Image: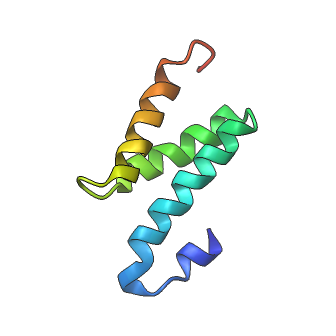
Amino acid sequence: MAAATSAKPDERKQALFLAHLYLGLYYDSQGDTKQAHEHMTQAAGAAPAGGYMGDVAKVHLLLQKNAPNQK
């Protein structure tokens, strides 16, 4: 997150999107559903229109919301 936050202004939005996406995926793989959901929500909200990775964030967030163990 520090690297994304300190990215050049014209690259910061994309850097923050990717940082949240990959942190969300990481926390999900570790079983930390709260952190995963927080980061994936940020990623889905910042997803670039029409981008493949933005779709990945949105679908993953939808899957998290529909997971039986999600609170």
- Against 1, residue 33 (above or below) is above
Which quadrant is home to the N terminus?
Answer: bottom right
Relative vertical location of residue 49 with respect to residue 4 in this rendering, above or below: above
Q: Is residue 67 above or below residue 29?
A: above
Q: State which quadrant residue 9 falls in.
A: bottom left
Residue 33 position by quadrant: top right
The location of residue 12, given as percent across then percent down, is: 43, 76
Identify the residue at horizontal 46%, vertical 43% (top origin). 41
Question: Residue at left 52%, top 27%?
Answer: 64
Q: Which residue appears at 55% of the width and 43% of the height? A: 38
Residue 62 x/y as whole percent: 42, 29
Residue 71: image location, x then y, percent: 59, 20
| Relative to 62, 28 lies left or right | right
Report the residue at 55% width, 48% height from top.
39
Q: Is residue 58 left or right of residue 2?
A: left
46 in relation to 33, above or below? below
Nearest the viewer among 7 and 51 is 51
**Is 38 left, or right, of 31 in this rendering?**
left
The answer to which of 71 and 3 lies nearer the viewer is 3
Residue that lies at the very extreme toward the bottom in this rendered image:
8
Residue lying farthest to the left in this orientation: 50
Q: Measured from the top left, where is residue 20 in percent x and y?
A: 54, 56
